[in-house]
Amino acid sequence: MKVLVLDEAVADLAAGFRFYQRQADGLGDYFLDTLWADIQALQIYAGIHSRHFGYFRLLSKRFPFAVYYKVEAGIVRVYAVLNWRKNPGLIVSRLE
């Protein structure tokens, strides 16, 4: 299955990178490596995750981030990569 990461999700990843890079040198790189691996795994595991706010939600194993995606016509579209500890209202407004 093909995985398409939308620009908004790439911007979310960049923001996460900047945040973690400020915490410790190299942590931002580890964040990106981990989240990109999770996203690439959707080629195999897309559609098995629980639904939240109308999207499938993949929770990262190493960081408190969720990948929100939809499967449409054999293509996985990643719409957002968000910190799941944030206020649910903020997440919903971001996904609308």
Image: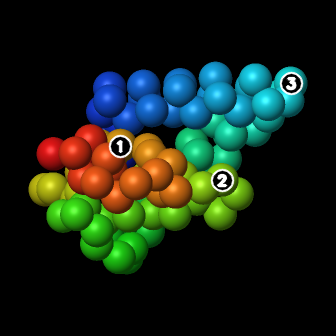
SS label for mark 3: loop
Mark with earlier residue (2, 3)? 3
The residue nearer to you, when weighing 85 against 61, is 85
Alpha carbon separation for disc pair 1 and 2: 15 Å
The residue indicated by pointer 2 is: 63
Residue at (76% x, 23% y) in the render: 22
Alpha carbon separation for disc pair 3 and 1: 25 Å
Q: Amino acid under label 3?
A: Asp
Mark 1: few, some, or many residues within 10 Å (few <14, many ≥20)? many
Q: Position of residue 79 (x, y in %)?
A: 29, 43
Image position of 57 with respect to 34: above or below: below
Q: Position of residue 46 (x, y in %)?
A: 37, 65
Task: Work out which quarter of the rendered image holds the N terminus and state it.
Answer: bottom left
Residue at (22% x, 45% y) in the render: 93
67 lies left or right of 90: right
The residue nearer to you, when weighing 88 against 49, is 88
Q: Is residue 86 visible?
A: yes
The residue indicated by pointer 1 is: 80
Alpha carbon separation for disc pair 2 and 3: 16 Å
The residue nearer to you, when weighing 44 against 93, is 93
SS label for mark 2: loop
Residue at (46% x, 52% y) in the render: 86
Mark with earlier residue (3, 1)? 3
SS label for mark 1: strand
Q: Is residue 77 visible?
A: no
Q: Amino acid under label 1?
A: Ala
Q: Amino acid under label 2?
A: Phe
Image position of 73 with respect to 35: above or below: below
The residue indicated by pointer 3 is: 25
